[in-house]
Image (cartoon, helix red, strand yellow):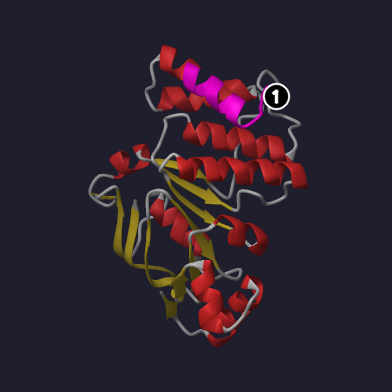
């Protein structure tokens, strides 16, 4: 479980994150939505300890990220906005490298790597160098290396950005599988179709603040809209907080 309490982050005079609070629970997929510049990526970077908040608290499985950031990192699997593969390594070698960084023994490393290659349909690229990979192949490899240490909490920043229809479909199915395994899944997206199909709860951020935190059905009901995209536009347009 990921708990966020009163996060603040400013860059000079610009308040990027201004008191964000929410909880992403185990066995659920939580969507983080907002227009460009709303503070989503800054919030995510503070969650996975890449950036320190000016004020507020992040707790992962009850561990305070400010007190023990290394323990928090061990409990997180992160697909950041920048994928950053090592191009001279194969997909399998990229996964192995991150497994060794997490201290996995070689026997466990091999089984974890092979399991992720199977789950993500990576057999065709496992032994190919990452240089020249398509966007979908890069995303699959980045997800596999993020999950090789078997974290209970998964953060995905725009995971389907730039993917074709088949790759997007496969990734949605994989996210649903993570939920079925009881993991906490938090992801940001601009695509309302996948948010509506996947999310148990949606947190909407605008101007660095949470303006809605509810289930998709509750958001539609509260705004009087049948379409989630219309509900989102109304929430952002009125900048009124909704909770359910």
Magenta-drawn segment: 111-123
What x and y, as percent, mark residue 214?
A: 45, 70
Residue 32 in view in this figure: yes
Looking at the rendering, in which quadrant would you find the C terminus?
Answer: bottom left
For the stretch drawn in magenta, the main secondary structure is: helix
Work out whether residue 187 or residue 175 is closer to the camera in this orientation and state it. Answer: 175
Work out whether residue 152 or residue 159 is closer to the camera in this orientation and state it. Answer: 152
Q: Residue furthest bottom?
A: 238
96 lies left or right of 196: left
Q: Quadrant of residue 22?
A: bottom left
At horizontal 61% and vertical 43% (from top left) the residue drawn is 173
4 lies left or right of 28: left
- Element marked by disc 1: loop
Q: Is residue 145 above or below residue 242?
A: above
What x and y, as percent, mark residue 48?
A: 41, 49
Residue 112 among magenta residues:
yes
Which residue is denoted by mark 1 in the rendering?
125
């Amino acid at each position: 479980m990921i708990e966020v309490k009163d996060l603040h982050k400013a860059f000079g005079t610009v308040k990027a994150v201004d008191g964000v609070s929410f909880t992403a629970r185990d066995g659920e997929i939580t969507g983080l939505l907002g227009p460009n510049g709303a503070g989503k990526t800054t919030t995510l970077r503070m969650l996975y300890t890449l950036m320190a908040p000016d004020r507020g608290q992040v707790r992962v499985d009850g561990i305070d990220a400010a007190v023990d950031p290394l323990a928090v990192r061990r409990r997180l699997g992160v697909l950041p906005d920048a994928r950053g593969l090592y191009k001279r390594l194969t997909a399998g070698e990229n996964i192995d490298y991150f497994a060794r960084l997490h201290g996995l023994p070689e026997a466990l490393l091999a089984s974890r790597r092979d399991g992720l290659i199977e789950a993500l349909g990576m057999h065709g690229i496992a032994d190919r160098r990452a240089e020249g990979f398509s966007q979908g192949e890069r995303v699959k490899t980045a997800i596999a290396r993020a999950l090789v240490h078997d974290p209970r909490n998964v953060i995905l920043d725009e995971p389907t950005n730039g993917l074709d229809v088949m790759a997007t479909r496969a990734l949605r199915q994989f996210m649903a599988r993570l939920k079925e395994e009881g993991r906490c899944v938090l992801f940001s997206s601009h695509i309302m179709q996948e948010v509506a199909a996947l999310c148990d709860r949606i947190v909407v951020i605008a101007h660095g603040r949470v303006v809605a935190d509810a289930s998709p059905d509750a958001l539609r009901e509260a705004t009087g809209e049948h379409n989630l995209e219309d509900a989102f536009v109304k929430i952002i347009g009125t900048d009124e907080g909704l909770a359910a």
